[in-house]
Amino acid sequence: MSLFLSTSSGDAPPPADGAAVRAWRAAEHGLDRVCGVDDNPLRQLGGLGFYLFWLIAVTGGYLYIFYDTSVDGAHASVEALTHGQWWAGGVMRSLHRYASDAFVAVIVLHLVRELMLGRFRGFRWYSWVSGVPTLWLAVAAGVIGYWMVWDTIALFVATATAEWFGALPGFGPALVRNFISEGAVSDRFFSLVVFLHIGLPLVLLFTMWAHVQRLTRPQTGASRAVALWSLAAMLVLSLAKPALSGPPADLVRLPASLPIDWFYMAPMPAIYAASPELVWALSIGLTLLLAVAPWLGRPGRPAPAEVVPQYCNGCRRCFADCPFAAIAMAPHPGGEGEIAVVDADRCASCGICAGSCPSAVPFRPGDRLVSGIDLPGLTVGALRDEVDAAFRQPGAAGATLVFACRRGAMPQARPGLVVFGLPCAGMLPPSFVEYGLRAGAAGVAVATCAHGDCEYRFGVRWTVERLAGEREPRLRRGVDRARLAVIHAGRENRAALEAQIESFRSRLAAAAAGSAAGGVRRRIFGGNGHG
């Protein structure tokens, strides 16, 4: 038998992944086997971005100590730093360059990953929109950093940038004259460049801080292994191919060919291949498209969680467990203690808060089970009623009960299997495991997303910790753990999920057969099992 719970709030199973998403997930899972889930760089792109930012800041601070903010001293000071102390300054310069390139690459990969996985709509709109400016701020800071070297590449970058901005109303072609005549560039220009090269990263850091404000426990750093391996790779690259300057800038002429850093200078060849106006149109158009993406083809959004004041005791468990900081605590309207308050705009309707509520206990007496916080379309009371109804049916006793996350792999209906689909495995109160066993289930399987793939960030982690007795609410110690299985499987691993469920059912059958045989022996031999 098979029973699937559906909600009236529109929380239907997600559509099948496209080829690009399957390819990305295959790459992630391949790196999981090499690095482990916790040290997979593709799973911590956001944190890696923060790590690279601070690495850029530290190396840039060292370089600034020796930098001369003058027309005659800028190029000379960089050369002295690169060649005069290659063992420190030269390595720092190269590390600064490669960390900056890696920073842009990580931002782009992070953007592409979240876009492919659809993690930009609905309650995620703020995180997405606040992240859009980071790429342009990073590129702007990097382009200005090239000016500081004041070699032939810097002159090309400055001239191309001036021509690009010259196409805007209010600037005009006269802007380029600042870089094509002797004496047009002064020491004050380099003071302005240094100010911008420091100021823009500060604005970028503020944007990155705002980007994670709607996340609980945001990842603002890489794991130790990823941090060390990234640093080692960039150090090896810095020693093998150090960053070097070109000849000093000559305002009279530009060289015929130049090496291009495609991480920062990609728009500049396009300015000459097409036109500055076209590059502006594409840049502005892409930015606007990314900014409005959360509202393009937006699917129906599930109803947010609701708090029932008379059952909320202000325990703060939902506040601590919510992955998206959608729950705040406020004075209880009853006059004592606190009450949880849900921000509907931030709520993911994942149900993790319902799974954390101490009042979501199915053993409570009464015809109607009401929890302190719940999803209006799929309450824990309705879940209890469905479990009761399922095991009242003829032949249901001894079936395996499965609580499965709809975002992961869902098992196929077949005899002896009672299946409930949940928005997230984290919605399941641990006491429902014991309740299912008492209702007549031979065993209970909880199917979550794969490690690192949780749609709601902490659903897998909280589920594992609650069932292991490491996090409130805990599964009671007296529950037979041999009759419980926690299975992790992504949407593409349905076959693996089915195989693990069948293996679990086989173990349950074998244990039941052994228990029955032991009972027969005890009856034959007087209850002591010996002849």
Image (tube, rainbow, N blue to C red):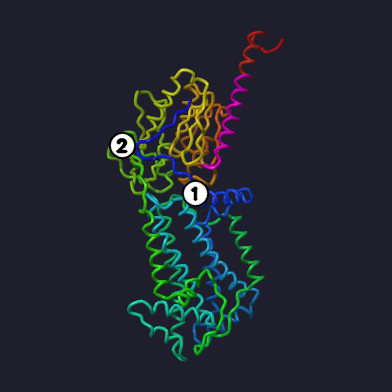
Q: Residue at x 63, y 11 (%)?
A: 520
The first of marks 2 and 1 along the sequence is 1
Question: Residue at label 1?
Answer: 18
Furthest residue to the front? 274
Which residue is denoted by mark 2 in the rendering?
A: 309
Foreground disc of the pair 2, 1: 1
Q: Considering depth in this image, is 190 or 260 the residue closer to the camera?
A: 260
- The residue closer to the viewer here, 358 or 111, is 111
Q: Secondary structure at mark 2?
A: helix
Q: Position of residue 464 (x, y in %)?
A: 52, 38
Image quadrant in which you'd find residue 392: top left
Vertical position of residue 118 compared to residue 170: above or below: above
Q: Count every numbered label the image shows and give the total.
A: 2
Q: Residues within 10 Å of mark 1 (few under 14, many from 20)?
A: few
Report the span colored magenta.
Answer: 490-513
Q: CA distance from mark 2 to mark 1?
A: 43 Å
Indicate the amino acid at tag 1: Gly
Residue 197: image tag: none
How crowded pointer 2 is (Cα within 10 Å; few <14, some 14-19, many 20+) is rated as some
- In terms of image quadrants, where is residue 511? top right
Task: Estimate the x, y position of residue 205 in percent, counting from the top left.
Answer: 44, 64
The residue that appears at 42% across and 25% down in the rendered structure is: 363
Work out whether 281 lies above or below 451.
below
Q: Quadrant of the C terminus?
A: top right
Q: Residue 503: say if magenta.
A: yes
Residue ranking furthest to the bottom? 182
In-front residue for pair 88/270 = 270
Q: Secondary structure at mark 1?
A: loop
Residue type at mark 2 is Pro
